[in-house]
Amino acid sequence: MRKSIALKAIILFVFLIPSSLIAQELFAGIEIGSKGVKMSVINVQNIKKGKYEVVDFWTENVAIAKGIAIDGKLAANDIDTAFDVVVKNYTKLLKEYKIEEKHIFIVVSSGVGMAKNIDILLQRLYVFTNINVAIITSETEGKLLLKGCIPPKEYSDSLILDIGGGNTKGGYVEEFNNDDILVFYPLTLDLGTVTFTEKINKKAKNNSINEFNELLVSALPELRAETDRLYQQSPKLSKKDNIYMSGGAVWAFYTLYKGKGAVENFNPFEIKEVEDYNTMIKTDYAKFEALASQNKDVEKVLKTYSQKYLISANAILLTLLEKMPDVKSKKIYFTKQGQMAWLLSYIADSAKRAKNIQ
């Protein structure tokens, strides 16, 4: 049974950054997610002031969370795949990018971390890297996303939602007693692009898109009910004027619908556009396939997600928006740097621990 966590408060803490991070330094992060393993390399100038440069970012698209939707466990071959991909890229960061071992962080996303046998993967990685790989809980992931994806001046008037492969997470903050203490309220939905797709696929008798769309119709009532429960547990979110969204589902929608990748960090869009796109990916998918031959942004999306993944991902996105209280009065943004949020916070936290700052 999904835990009721929406009213659980987590105090947001302010990182104190030692002078050692003022100079430029290379840091890297490896995130093991449901739909793939993401690698980030950033050049930190002054993280306290948000000064950093993205040196490189790449993803290996290996969907390792399919088994979770079936029996709650990672399949043995998916554990092997995840281990091999991480080891290969960890070695690349050390040898090609010359990044110090202490500056490389490895985390498991909340969608993968829910697997009952995740310890097998963690132990294998520890033996090879000597890194205690952390599992980011959905609550922590939401907090990191908010800090990394929303301009600080808009914290109190905004919420963040990220549609991942294994689950959907996010949250918002409230200010207490005018003393600048921000309290974070997490939002978690135990359905993401991969888990929702596999939930539908379990009932499939053939591999056709028509059958998938029919099964999706049957699955939507549960998705809508779960979303209703999520929002009912968090009545204060209705007061937020801005909705910031990240994750593969939103990236895919924005890129395919606009015909190009996002240029700005914060890119506005409307629910009507999501509705139009929802029809397009079901009935006019050939349009995107034709466009991919001449558009690298579109090609990247189609190489990352199959048509079924795109359909189920957008079903989650559309449901989250349709069920959002008073959504028509809100401004909605796709924030493209969500994949960097956890790494920046990890760098700052690591620096804090290294200097024993309390």
Image: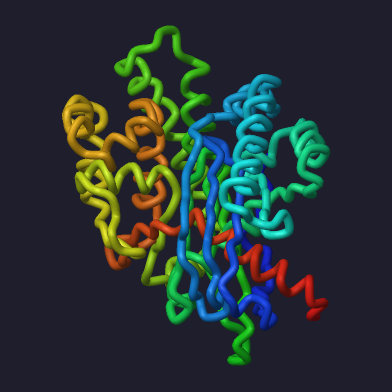
Q: Residue at x 25, y 28 (%)?
A: 282
Visible in this render: residue 217? yes
User: Is 45 placed above or below 82 here?
Assistant: below
Q: Residue at x 36, y 39 (%)?
A: 314
Colouring style: rainbow
Visible in this render: residue 16? no
Q: Is residue 339 left or right of residue 286?
A: right
Q: Residue 276 location, x and y as percent? A: 20, 42
Q: Is residue 5 left or right of residue 290?
A: right
Q: Nearer the viewer, residue 199 or 47?
A: 47
Q: Residue at x 67, y 68 (%)?
A: 9
Which quadrant would residue 204 be assigned to in this image?
top left
Q: Residue 66 location, x and y as percent? A: 57, 26
Q: Nearer the viewer, residue 55 or 274?
A: 55
Q: Residue 29 location, x and y as percent? A: 60, 53
Residue extending farthest to the bottom is 178
Q: Is residue 239 left or right of residue 302?
A: right
Which quadrant would residue 79 be assigned to in this image?
top right
